[in-house]
Amino acid sequence: MPVKQSASKEEFLVAIGLNQQDPEDRKKFCAMWAEVTTYWVSHFETSSRSILKTEYASVLGVQRPYKWAHLNPTAINSAIAEIWRQGQPWPRRFYDLGRSEDPKVYNWVLKWLLWHVCRYRDWRNRKGRTSSSNGSYGRAGAGSLQSSDPTALPPHDYWSTVMN
């Protein structure tokens, strides 16, 4: 049964028939997450501004990491199709559950995964992060990202639902 892209990980897993408590199911989810993350890093984090919606493509203030709302739906659907084509055979079984005739959704399983990868790549969505004097980042109660450059983000310092 399809879930909204903003659905929790638990809701998503139930919808695709996986149990978060089962170690084998967790491995399957982690493998799907890894496939989508690999695609995201190689295409969306390095792509030209052509992946942005027309109204954002010329706005210089819109910088990487791009927010989901900035991405062109055509680029998202192309990513979904490419991930499905490049996917390993067994995750494709789960990806096939998400096929839809609705052009706004295209594939809800891959769209959910892409949305969540994007969400956790966008440092602006992380609350309570601080930078220590040595440049390492950690959790803080009510703090915010602090650095000499307010947009600075250490390379590949990402929080992921897979780890939780």
Image (spheres, rainbow, N blue to C red):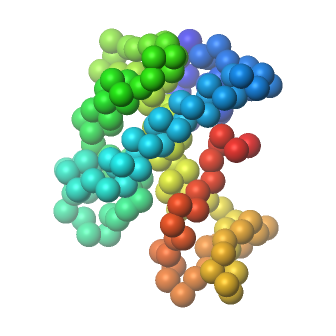
Q: Which of 5 and 42 is in front in this view?
A: 42
Q: Can residue 68 be seen in this view?
A: no
Image x and y of residue 122, in percent? 49, 57
Give the left or right position of residue 30, taking residue 89 as reference: right
Q: Which of 3 and 18 is in front in this view?
A: 18
Quarter of the image that includes the C terminus: top right
Quarter of the image that includes the N terminus: top right
Give the left or right position of residue 69, taking residue 48 as reference: right
Q: Which residue is drawn at 37% across and 24% down?
A: 84
Q: Which residue is drawn at 68% across and 86% down?
A: 133
Image x and y of residue 72, in percent? 27, 43
Image x and y of residue 113, in percent? 51, 34
Q: Which residue is drawn at 62% across and 25% down?
A: 28
Give the left or right position of residue 33, taking residue 114 as reference: right
Give the left or right position of residue 131, taking residue 156 as reference: right
Q: Residue at x 33, y 64 (%)?
A: 62
Q: In this picture, is 101 found above or below 85?
A: above
Q: In this picture, is 55 found above or below 145?
A: above
Q: Where is residue 59, by image quadrant?
A: bottom left
Image x and y of residue 146, in percent? 61, 79
Q: Where is residue 58, by image quadrant?
A: bottom left
Q: Where is residue 103, by image quadrant?
A: top left
